[in-house]
Image (cartoon, helix red, strand yellow):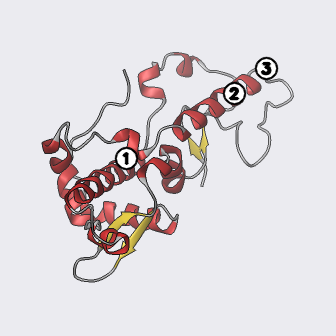
Amino acid sequence: MRRTLVSSRKCAPSAEFRDISFNTMLRLTKKADYGLMALKYLAEQAELRHAAHSNKDAAQNDKNNAQSAKDIAEAYHIPPQLLAKILQTLAKAGLLVSHAGTNGGYSLARAAKDISAFQVIRAIDGPLFITSCITIHGTCDLAGHCTIKEPLRKVNDSIKDLLSDISIADLTEPAEAHPEAALAGGLVNIGS
């Protein structure tokens, strides 16, 4: 599956492209946004449970950290069926562990600091490309005449690097700073 972040144009900018403001250009899909929100929630809940049960066995603690799709959906007002599909996709990608049973649900497959925003977005939406000329399928129609392919590749790589440097732990707030936000599924601003 190919992902386009900025536009579906070939290589040469059009008048329509130049009129788009930066705020509307780089946009996550709702699925990717929901996936990041779900992992943030799971990380915060794991942190809360870890603080409350720090002396329990690690394997049992992982099982206790499992949260249902319904709980996550309610915390963020996400359509439950859509979230369930997203969580299954993230589990298949190895970012979540699915726990079956009465107290089952989902937990992070590894520490929140070891899961990047890029991994989540790529698992849900596939590869990130800002233009159709930067793809895994080769060159575009204007490859011989295009003068901006290399600068756009650098932008694409910079976006990938930035998202790779943001961990799920970076999206969370310490439970002691805002306990009501962690419990209520509060959002965090990662920009300045």
Q: Left or right: where does residue 49 sit relative to residue 95? A: left
Camera-side residue of 41 and 160: 41
Q: Are marks 2 and 3 in contact (CB under 8 Å)?
A: no
Q: Which mark is residue 178?
A: none
Reading the chain from its start, which is encountered first: label 1 or label 3?
1
Which image quadrant for residue 59? bottom left
Camera-side residue of 166 and 36: 166
Image coordinates of residue 92 in percent, x first then y, are: 50, 69
Q: Are marks 1 and 3 in contact (CB under 8 Å)?
A: no
Q: Left or right: where does residue 79 sit relative to residue 142? A: left
Check disc 2 and give the amino acid type.
Answer: Lys
Please give the residue where the numbered disc 1 appears in the rendered image: 30
Secondary structure beneath disc 3? loop
Rounded to the nearest angstrom, the CA distance separating label 2 from label 3 is 13 Å
Reading the chain from its start, which is encountered first: label 2 or label 3?
3
Q: Residues within 10 Å of mark 2 (few under 14, many from 20)?
A: few
Q: Residue furthest left?
A: 180
Eye-nearest disc, 1 or 2: 2
Q: Left or right: where does residue 44 sit relative to residue 15? A: left
Question: Quick check: 4 above or below 21?
Answer: below
Reading the chain from its start, which is encountered first: label 1 or label 2?
1
Check disc 1 and give the amino acid type.
Answer: Lys
Please give the residue where the numbered disc 2 appears in the rendered image: 154
So how many labels did they put on this image? Answer: 3
Check disc 3 and give the amino acid type.
Answer: Thr
Question: Quick check: 31 above or below 85?
Answer: above
Question: Quick check: 60 above or below 13?
Answer: below
Please give the residue where the numbered disc 3 appears in the rendered image: 147
